[in-house]
Each structure stands twice: as C-alpha cells, then as structure tokens.
Amino acid sequence: MEKVIIVGSGCAGLTAAIYAARANLSPLVLEGRQPGGQLSTTTMVENFPGFPEGIDGPQLIINMHEQAEKFGARFAYSEVTDYDPQPDHVRIKADDEWLETRALIVASGASARWLGLENEEKLVGHGLTSCATCDGAFYRNVPVCVIGGGDSAAEESLFLTRFASKVYLIHRRDALRASKIMADRVLACEQIEPIWNTVVTRYVPDEKGEMSAVVLRNVQTHEERELPVACVFVAIGHDPNTKAFQGKLETDPDGYLLVRHLAESKHPGVFIAGDVADRVYKQAITAAGSGCAAAMEAEKYLGALGK
C-alpha cells in the first residue's frame, strides 16, 4: 500500500512530488508516455519566476525531477488505464498492474490538438506552438498565423497583436465560432487578417528547421498558396488526459476534472492538479501552484487518518 501516488510528471505532478517527498511521504510518480508533459516540447520558458534569462522547458522539467528525487520521490514510466476507488484507499491500474494507495493526486495534464501534418512533431518549439501566452513574445515584428475559429483562437490572435507585425487568422469556415464579443474584437482589429474557408495543408520549414511558411488550401475553390509566417499558433483546443477516470470522477462536458475545495475531488483521498482541471490558464506556474495545493491537501488527509 502506497501513501501517495501521483499520476503525471509535468509541472503540477513534479511540484506535488517535491512537496509530498519533503513531507516524508515517499510518493510514487507515474510518468506516463510523455514524461514532463507539454513543457518537454517547449524550447524556452521566459515566464516562470526565478529565471530572468529564461530556461529550456525540458531543462526545467529535469530540474524539478531531480529536486523531487532528492527528497525521496520515486518514478515509474507507467501509464494509468483504470481507476477503482475504495472506501479507505484507491486502486489504479498502471501497465496491467493494480496498485493501491491511501492518497492519489491526478496531474495527468491535457494534450493540445494538432493538425496531424508532416513534420509536425519536429516543428513544435521551432515555429509551431499551441500557446500564444507562452511563446508570443519570441515573435516580435514578424508575421504569424493562428489556426482556429473559437474563443481560444480569437484570444490568441488578439494577444499576438502585441508582438507580431501581422496576425493571420486561418479558419475553415466563413465565420468565427467565437462568442460575439470576441469575434467583434478580432474583426475590428486592423492588425488581424482573417483568411476564411481555408485550411493549412503543409508546414514549410527553412534550412535550419524553423517555420518559414504554411501552404493554404481554400476549401471551396481548392486553390493552394503559400503564406510566409515565422510561427504557427494552433488553437483548436486541448483534450484533458482523463480517459481512465471518465464516469468515476466528476468532469465537465469536455472531460476536464472538476475540483471542489482547492484540489479535492468527490472521492476522499483523491486530489487534482494542473491542466487536467484547468481549461482557462494552462500555464506552468499555475500548474505548479495547484500541484503544491494538492500535495498539501493529501498530507493533511493522511495526517487525519493517522497514516
């Protein structure tokens, strides 16, 4: 019987591991199939406090991993596929093995939706991203494009006008799906140029492997053209990594886990942290803060049990 199992090894999971390990709970961290979460695919993080010159996303994850390990956290590359709450503990299935724990912290994150085009994985962090707040400042005075038509795409486009010389908003329909107030702001902004009835069919990297252009296709005329851009911001949504918990923990209609007081779920001893429940901010620092809260709530819960 484990005292604490943490599902996920991004900022939320690793912060929870640091706090739980320092509380002498010897947490077991199940890293899943993408250790480090979304930060592991980010080249530079400039908005995490304490790094005035910025830090590579993978290096930040390595530092947090080492810090947690230093205090006694243990790690396994296991992926959780099932969840079975019991009255006084929790059972989870990881790589066909059932594990038991007094407290569980779910920090499994959310995965950005991508287009599935050629070279997509190689270009992430090299002119292809899903977070304008994270990466917009790197693209000052150059043209960029945003793909999508909902509120997220509208918000990203407006945010990017602070930096980019031009923001192309590429949408496969002839009108935005965003709320009227957001759509009106976008359409009133001279710096944003909507490109309607259009999809991206190919990324064009330069000789250094950085984004230089995208190939567009009009879905009505089927005509193709190349659009020079320094970065592509994909804003077609995220999918929370909650498959193992569907129907067993409370979720909203899109599958994000619902949090009660601070980090608590509906099941005693199960706590939630990070992007698996956050559909608004999705930042490394907010994930870290919620990981801290989840670990402290788990410690308090175990203390009350006398464990």
Image (spheres, rainbow, N blue to C red):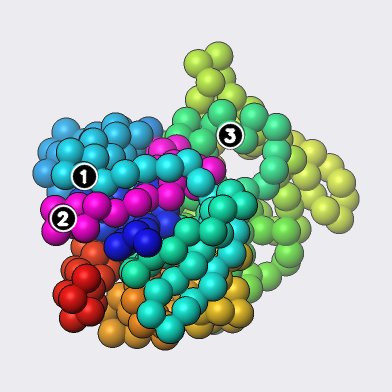
Q: Which amino acid is tagged 3?
A: Glu
Looking at marks 1 and 3 on the same chain, the residue that comes earlier in the sequence is marked by 1
Q: Which amino acid is tagged 1?
A: Gly
98 vs 125, left or right, is right
- Whole-Å distance between the Cαs marked 2 and 1? 8 Å
- Whole-Å distance between the Cαs marked 2 and 3? 38 Å
Picture coordinates of residue 267 (x, y %)? 41, 82
- Whole-Å distance between the Cαs marked 1 and 3? 33 Å
Residue 287: which quarter of the image?
Answer: bottom left
- Which quarter of the figure is the N terminus placed in? bottom left
* Residue 222 in the image: above or below residue 207: below
Find disc 2 in the rendering and name its residue. Answer: 24
Task: Determine the residue positioned at 44% across, 63% down.
Answer: 100
Find disc 1 in the rendering and name its residue. Answer: 72
264 vs 258, left or right, is left
Find out whether the residues at labels 2 and 1 contact each other: C-beta distance under 8 Å.
Answer: yes
